Amino acid sequence: MKLSGKTAIVTGGGRDIGRACALRLAQDGARVVINYHASSAGAESAVAEIVKAGGEAIALQGDMTKQADVEALIAKTRDQFGDEINVVVHVTGGLVARKKFDEMDLEHWNTVMSLNLTSLFQVVKAVVPFMPEGSSIIPFASQAGRDGGGPGAIAYATSKGAVMTMTRGMAKEFGPRIRVNAVCPGMIDTDFHNVFTKDEVRKNVANSTPLKREGASEDVANLIAFLASDQSAFMTGTSLDINGGILFS
């Protein structure tokens, strides 16, 4: 198994894409720590599924916008699985609400930036000292970071564009010891779109892709497993699109 003997953290791993990533990394042999904020049922069921299959996993609640929770996550990971942490998949993030520019206040702006960007900074800052040669950091950006997002998503799109820029900077600063590659999902069938995107919009977007469908969480998880492994050893600083061909970059 490609990740046998390695330890992986998945933040925001309690549902949808994050949960699928945790399961996929465990399938490849990684010991997995699942951070979740509110999705305890999904995180705990993922742990149970991994353990039943013969793997190792734990779940830990925490808010990645709070430094104390981030530090507790790293400490628990090292206490459970040893000093070294090899893979970090930072799924934590969200739109919060659709607000056009004239509807936004500073509180909304700061909330979105904290959730999508500052959380990444805090997790990386805390974990990098414990990542050995050959480690991998995989932040989640978004197609919105490339095209500016849909209606009411300026704050979200801006934060995800910043994640891509941060990815390039981290790749330069952390190489050659650590590789950093972001992913930019398009329309993936998740609760994110269940909440924030109308059904007719989702159908139209899916039909506009060359592949004529929405993505599945497992599609993204397969890409994450590749980026986490040595199979992507000559890749760093990239932001990889996974959107069914709706946008080429």
Image (tube, rainbow, N blue to C red):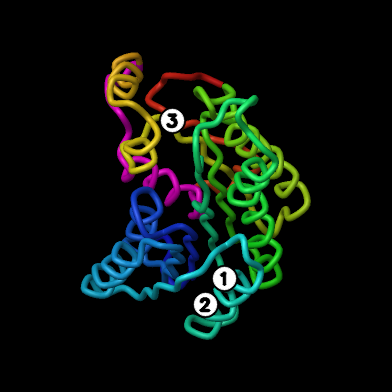
Residue 65 picture location, percent across and down: 61, 60
Circle nearer the viewer, 3 or 1: 3
Q: Does 211 appear above or below 224?
A: above
Question: Which of the numbered marks, if any, corresponds to residue 77?
Answer: 2
Decide if residue 239 is on the left or right side of residue 50: right
Disc with the residue nearer the chain's start (2 vs 3): 2
Q: Residue extending furthest left?
A: 52
* Amino acid type for the residue under numbered disc 1: Ile
Name the residue at 55% across, 73% down.
Answer: 73
Q: Residue extending furthest right?
A: 173
- The quadrant the C terminus occupies is top right
Marks 2/1 in contact by CB < 8 Å: the verdict is yes
CA gap between label 3 and label 1 equals 29 Å
Residue 62 picture location, percent across and down: 51, 69
Residue 17 picture location, percent across and down: 38, 48
What secondary structure is found at the residue carrying circle 3?
A: loop
What secondary structure is found at the residue carrying circle 1?
A: loop
Q: Which residue is mark 3?
A: 186
Is residue 219 one of those drawn in magenta?
yes
Disc with the residue nearer the chain's start (2 vs 1): 2
Circle nearer the viewer, 2 or 1: 2
- The quadrant the N terminus occupies is bottom left
Most foreground residue, 120 or 201:
201
Q: Is residue 102 visible?
A: yes
Question: Which of the numbered marks, if any, corresponds to residue 164?
Answer: none
Question: Which of the numbered marks, if any, corresponds to residue 85?
Answer: 1
Graded by Cα atoms within 10 Å as few (under 14), some (14 to 19) or many (20 or more), the crowding at tag 2 reads: many
* Amino acid type for the residue under numbered disc 3: Gly
Magenta residues, dominant SS class: helix
Decide if residue 167 is on the left or right side of residue 10: right
Name the residue at 60% across, 69% down.
Answer: 70
**Badge count:** 3
